Amino acid sequence: MSEAPPKIRIRGLSKAFGAKIVLDSLDLDVPAGRGFVVIGGSGSGKSVLIKCILGLIEPDAGTIEIDGRNVLAMHRSERETVNTRIGMLFQQGALFDSLPVWENVAFGLLARKMMRRAEAKPRAIEILAQVGLGSDVADLYPSELSGGMQKRVALARAIAARPDLIFFDEPTTGLDPIMGAIIDALIVEQVERLGATAFSITHDMASAQRIGNEIAMIHKGKIIWQGPAERIYDSGNPYVDQFVRGKSEGPITMEVRG
């Protein structure tokens, strides 16, 4: 039996800002229908990688295929069609302060005219229930919610259009360990319910193991290790070992000092 094609296939992806090389001919395969996590330190290229895949940053070279199609070669209308199947949970939630919760959740549905306004609020309330929030939250504004509730609303917005590919940018940022575990459990539950592929970036190792079936580490713009989440503490890679165990001494520290 032939192996299933990856949901995302990246080859030779490069991006520099002036003299600073952020992505250096990076190769990566993201399997379909699983939780995939990219870990790495600050400045390692995680955020630039995810922004290149989403089309927010244009790389200098390389290819990015989603479902076998190179999105970098697509016309704008084609890319927009692909984007309708993508959800995104931003690091700080990125909720619109001026809109009530239900409009935040339904924002993409309304903006893309996938649903009439009269239908959107009941749909938003249904989605809020899926992330453990009651209908009484729908008419509140983001500023009236706790950090954990805001993160749930952001997750509800990410899954509103029933995407088959969802990106998570540091999903536990700003949350205490208990709320972080709750949000991670919700992420896993909703991704499995949708049968979606989840692509996350994080430096929170507890979160990475909860939401990831597979983990890859990026260092100096390249993927230096990729494997099952359960092997992350037994990778055999000194860079990975230092990072996941939070050691002050090791090859990463030596390079920083150099």
Image (cartoon, helix red, strand yellow):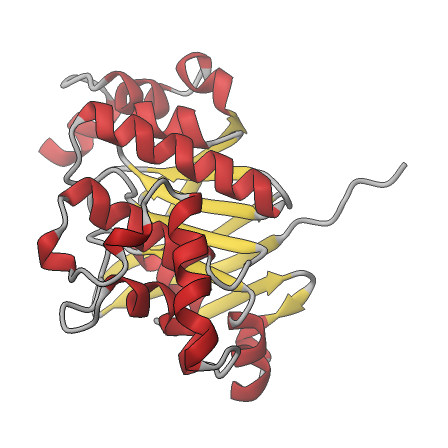
**Is 205 in front, or is 41?**
205
Residue 177 falls in which quadrant of the image? top left
Looking at the image, residue 236 lies above or below residue 116 = above
Answer whether residue 206 is visible to the viewer in this image. Answer: yes
At a point 47% along the width and 69% down the height, the residue shown is 61
* Quarter of the figure with the C terminus: top left
**Is 19 in front, or is 171?**
171
- Residue at the front extreme of this rendering: 136
At a point 52% along the width and 66% down the height, the residue shown is 62
- Residue at the top extreme of this rendering: 234
Looking at the image, residue 36 lies above or below residue 153 = above
Residue 46 percent location from the top left of the image: 33, 49
**Left or right: where 150 falls relative to 212:** left
Answer whether residue 44 is visible to the viewer in this image. Answer: no
Looking at the image, residue 182 lies above or below residue 248 = below
Residue 250 falls in which quadrant of the image? top left
* Quarter of the figure with the N terminus: top right
**Is 65 in front, or is 249?**
65
At a point 14% along the width and 35% down the height, the residue shown is 256
Residue 214 percent location from the top left of the image: 52, 31
Looking at the image, residue 189 lies above or below residue 43 = above
Residue 99 falls in which quadrant of the image? bottom left
At a point 25% along the width and 37% down the height, the residue shown is 172
**Is 110 in front, or is 244?**
110
- Residue at the right extreme of this rendering: 1
**Left or right: where 77 falls relative to 22:** right
Residue 96 percent location from the top left of the image: 20, 69
Residue 183 percent location from the top left of the image: 32, 35
